[in-house]
Image (tube, rainbow, N blue to C red):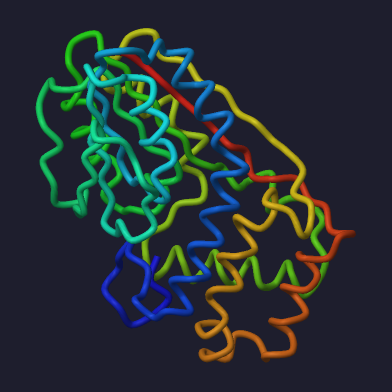
Amino acid sequence: MTTDPRAKPSYRIADDPEQTALEAKRLEALTASRDPATFELLEARGIGPGWRCLEVGAGSGTVARFMGERVGNGGSVRSIDVDTRFHCEVGSNVDVVELDVVDADLGHAEFDLVHARAFLQHVEQREAILDHMVEALRPGGWIVVQDSDWTLFLEQELPEPFRRLVQLSMQGTRTRHGWDPHVGGRLLHMLRARDLIDVDSRGIVTTMHGCTPSAEWYVGGLARAKSVHVGENDMSESEFDAAIAQARSPDFAALSPISMAAWGRR
């Protein structure tokens, strides 16, 4: 998300070259950590040749690329994000569209599979967007949503000043952008409330190790917001640097937030 605290809430990263490079690295860590579980979820739903798929909040585009490989030339994938600068190269059956999902019509009864990962927690209009995602499914089509629940992460022991940086970051993101750290824990009930069938869910907790993608997908985002926390005098520059150094130490280990997934069929 934008790191300008005065900016209109947006899921788009600032155009500053340094910010762009940092976000690209963070997304690399996120895909390395999360893609295997996501691919397993989609394969379990039966994704295959001829399917029409929609990827919402595509990020680096690796999930859309995977979908394109699975559906083949007889299928298609629409991959949408408010910011497509980080999208990887994809096959000719994947249509990459820069689109603000908040204001978009996602279609009606068009897709065999609709997927979103690490997206709903970041948008205040998540209930309306989820309605649109369900509306975009054809009868019998699957929706798969993945988001985090940060309850466990926040309750564990974390070193100072890293804990303080985490708390400041979460408070600021909630205030400025409507981020919700507990969406993951509500996904099952959000889908059940929409009259879907075969609704189920699962959660995964892993260890976040310093200097590895398992932690860097999150720590990289904190590091990218240095100008916000230091500029607003939340922390001194030395405190901020010490907090990031703690989380990037090879000795750092913490339980991840719960990576929740829920799915259902229209």
Q: Examine the rendered structure and indicate whether residue 237 appears above or below residue 64.
A: below
Give whichever of 117, 157 is nearer the camera: 117
Q: Quadrant of residue 157?
A: bottom right
Which residue lies at the image location 73% right of the left edge and 50% below the top edge? 155
Which residue lies at the image location 56% right of the left edge and 42% below the top edge? 149
Q: Examine the rendered structure and indicate whether residue 221 appears above or below residue 131.
A: below
Give whichever of 220, 88 is nearer the camera: 88
Q: Examine the rendered structure and indicate whether residue 145 appears above or below residue 51.
A: below
**Left or right, 105 with reference to 17:** left
Please provide percent x and percent y for residue 33: 62, 42
**Left or right, 235 with reference to 51:** right
Which residue lies at the image location 60% right of the left edge and 65% below the top edge? 220
Please provide percent x and percent y for residue 219: 65, 63
Indicate the quadrant containing the C terminus: top left, top right, bottom left or bottom right: top left
Please provide percent x and percent y for residue 176: 38, 70
Q: Quadrant of residue 158?
A: bottom right
Which residue lies at the image location 59% right of the left edge and 69% below the top edge? 222
Indicate the quadrant containing the N terminus: top left, top right, bottom left or bottom right: bottom left
Please provide percent x and percent y for residue 123: 33, 53
The number of numbered badges drawn on the structure is 0
For this orientation, the residue located farthest to the right is: 251
